[in-house]
Amino acid sequence: MKKTDTLTIGRKLLLGTMFAAGLTATLMPAQAEMLDVEKDELKFGFIKLTDMAPLAIAYEKGYFEDEGLFVTIEPQANWKVLLDRVITGELDGAHMLAGQPIAATIGFGTKAHIVTPFSMDLNGNGITVSNEIWEMMKPHLEMQDDGKPVHPIKASALKPVVEQFKDEGKPFNMGMVFPVSTHNYELRYWLASGDIHPGYYSKTDISGQIQGDALLSVTPPPQMPATLEAGTIYGYCVGEPWNQAAVFKGIGVPVITDYEIWKNNPEKVFGLTKEFTEKYPNTTLALTKALIRAAKWLDENDNANRMEAVEILSRSEYVGADAEVIANSMTGTFEYEKGDKRDVPDFNVFYRYFATYPYYSDAVWYLTQMRRWGQITEHKPDSWYDEVAKSVYRPDIYLQAAKMLVEEGHVGEADFPWETDGYREPTPAADIIDGIAYDGRTPNAYIDSLPIGLKGKQIVDGSEVVGG
């Protein structure tokens, strides 16, 4: 084909495209004036888990570039390294455990004021036990007519196993990913709901194992299956794909998902230093806009894009696990015992149910669990929980970004809770494994309603709980 022919065809295509655009302008997103970002080259960190997906999608689909941002996304060795690098400025922001910004801000562990304008997802975790422990649990399970267990599986089925280990003088070791991780608190919540004490923290002992029936310790997510296989731990709580990896390897059985522990519980957040948000307010808005669009893409049209997301996440630069393993939980199913695959359509939620809105009540729940197990060593009034939540979670930034996206036609107005005071409606008892309702507006009443854990003005002194 001659060059002139190519140019003629190109002009015709361009004119046709312009004409079509004129006819369908009302159906297309409005052309928005791009934010004048203060910093356009950014580096974000993540841990190799399925729920880092909004970062990968915002990058792969060009949503960051649409906002004038040139982003590098980099996996980190573990959660501590990731947090430290955000604090030092080596990373501009990161996929974080929801407990990390809260703990850093109140000074549990590394002290730094970290904030979040964006909640990355709901649900997404599971608790897995070794094959040996599963066989020991089976006699204590209620079974269906087809011989498969009734779900959700309660920790009460594990209690006789833990007691047997104790009688034999053997520690019952379990893994979680970080002391302020959702996984730590969910595993503790599940154990305590079955009358298994997961242990306390104190000012002088931050092992978290004081008075513990089960002894919890940190294992990085990708190392969970190998640590279980080695017999170092007998079970763990982790995000995907590391529960399904145990099923595929034939080394363990996921017994419960966090959706069954607390329906539509908050999971990861996107964390930034408060200093970053103040120094680069437009950049913060721009990156929040890109992440909201990515979350929408992940859930839209009844999860129609999930298989494409699975392919992206399976790449070595992201999660780097087999696509089949990632798909086992990310496409609306979850496999428990090998061959026992069940529908769990909301195992991963990125956008629906206002998943991306940073609710104060989500932050308060993490604080109640920190207090329950002694990471917050002393009693705090309800007002303190509210103040901390509002210093870390930034729905004001989120809603400003959402408003811009609505005006640009990228998202619908109904996708956001414009009228909320930042607190979810109380979670009903039926949606939580221990049958105890949660209301973020009354944290102390909630803490006192939990059978196992610190209450009132109790503190841990040495190996004893004292006070009242």
Image (cartoon, rainbow, N blue to C red):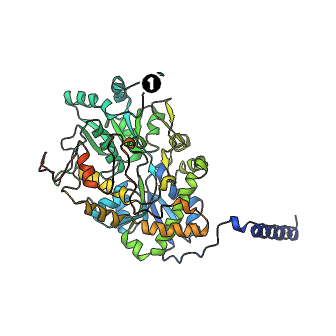
Q: Is residue 298 above or below residue 245?
A: below
Residue at image x 31%, y 37%?
A: 232
Instruction: Name the foreground residue: 211 vs 468.
Output: 468
Instruction: Name the foreground residue: 80 vs 454.
Output: 454
Horizontal placement of 58 versus 9: left or right?
left
Horizontal placement of 28 versus 383: left or right?
right
Q: Quadrant of residue 387?
A: bottom left
Q: Is residue 282 above or below residue 199?
A: below
The location of residue 193, given as percent across then percent down, is 30, 38
Q: Say what secondary structure mark 1 lies in.
A: loop
* Viewport quadrant of the N terminus: bottom right
Q: Quadrant of residue 6?
A: bottom right
Is residue 361 visible in the rendered structure shown here? Answer: yes
The location of residue 439, given as percent across then percent down, is 33, 52
Q: Which residue is mark 1?
A: 144
Give amino acid for label 1: Gln
